[in-house]
């Protein structure tokens, strides 16, 4: 059985770290790198909105699509970290703890591999 306390600790750590990481990455990224009409951004925002409306299966589909788009930029891309974090949070809301744990672990590995 998954240690839910450990999963919660990862989530708290990841949410704070990813938000800072993403903000810094967005601040340093030019509009040429991440256009406002990018598929990744559309999927991410749609997934987050669906999650807010408690449409969790729909949110999971959008956020999975966001991770697929992020792969095109490379797995170490901050977009992948952000999409994995959002996807894991939706999966935890659905009590899909094993899937959430896998995605949180991937995001943490990517975070740890990023240069300062």
Image (cartoon, helix red, strand yellow):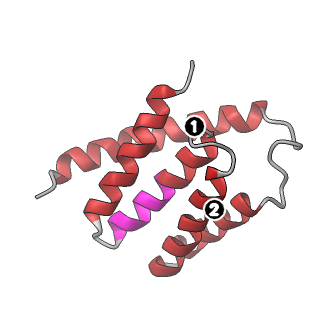
Q: Is residue 29 left or right of residue 54?
A: right
Q: CA distance from mark 1 to mark 2?
A: 17 Å
Prevalent SS, magenta region: helix
Residue corresponding to mark 1: 76
Give neighbour class at mark 1: few <14, some 14-19, many 20+ (Cα, 10 Å).
Answer: some
Please say if 92 is above or below 5: below
In screen coordinates, is 70 left or right of 39?
left
Residue sticking out furthest to the right = 32
Asked if disc 1 and disc 2 are in contact, CB closer than 8 Å, the reply is: no
**Is 39 left, or right, of 93 in this rendering?**
right
In the rendered image, which residue does mark 2 sit on?
44
Nearer the observer, 51 or 106: 106
Q: Earlier in the sequence, mark 1 or mark 2?
A: 2
Magenta region, residue range: 85-93
Mark 2 nearby-residue class (10 Å; few <14, some 14–19, many ≥20): many
Which secondary structure lies at badge 1? loop
Query: Which residue is found at the position 69% from the left and 45% from the top?
Result: 73
Which element carries disc 2, helix, strand or loop?
Answer: helix
Residue 40 location, quadrant:
bottom right
Position in image of residue 88 (x %, y %): 41, 58
Count all numbered tags in the image, as a single digit: 2
Residue 90 part of the magenta-drawn span: yes
What label does residue 86 carry, if any?
none
Task: Examine the structure image and report whether residue 44 is included in the region drawn in magenta.
Answer: no
Q: Quadrant of the N terminus?
A: bottom left
- Image quadrant containing the C terminus: top right
The image shows residue 69 at horizontal and vertical percentages of: 66, 58
The residue drawn where x is 72% and y is 65% is 42
Q: Nearer the viewer, mark 1 or mark 2?
A: 1
Where 12 falls versus 1 (above or below)? above
């Amino acid at each position: 059985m998954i240690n839910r306390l450990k999963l919660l600790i990862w989530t708290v750590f990841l949410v704070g770290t990813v938000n800072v990481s993403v903000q810094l990455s967005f601040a340093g990224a030019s509009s040429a790198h991440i256009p406002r009409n990018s598929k990744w951004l559309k999927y991410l925002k749609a997934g987050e909105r669906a999650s807010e409306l408690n449409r969790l299966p729909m949110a999971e589909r959008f956020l999975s699509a966001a991770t697929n788009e992020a792969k095109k930029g490379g797995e170490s891309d901050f977009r992948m970290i952000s999409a994995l974090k959002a996807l894991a949070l939706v999966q935890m809301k659905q009590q899909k703890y094993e899937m959430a744990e896998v995605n949180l672990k991937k995001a943490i590995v990517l975070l740890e591999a990023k240069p300062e």
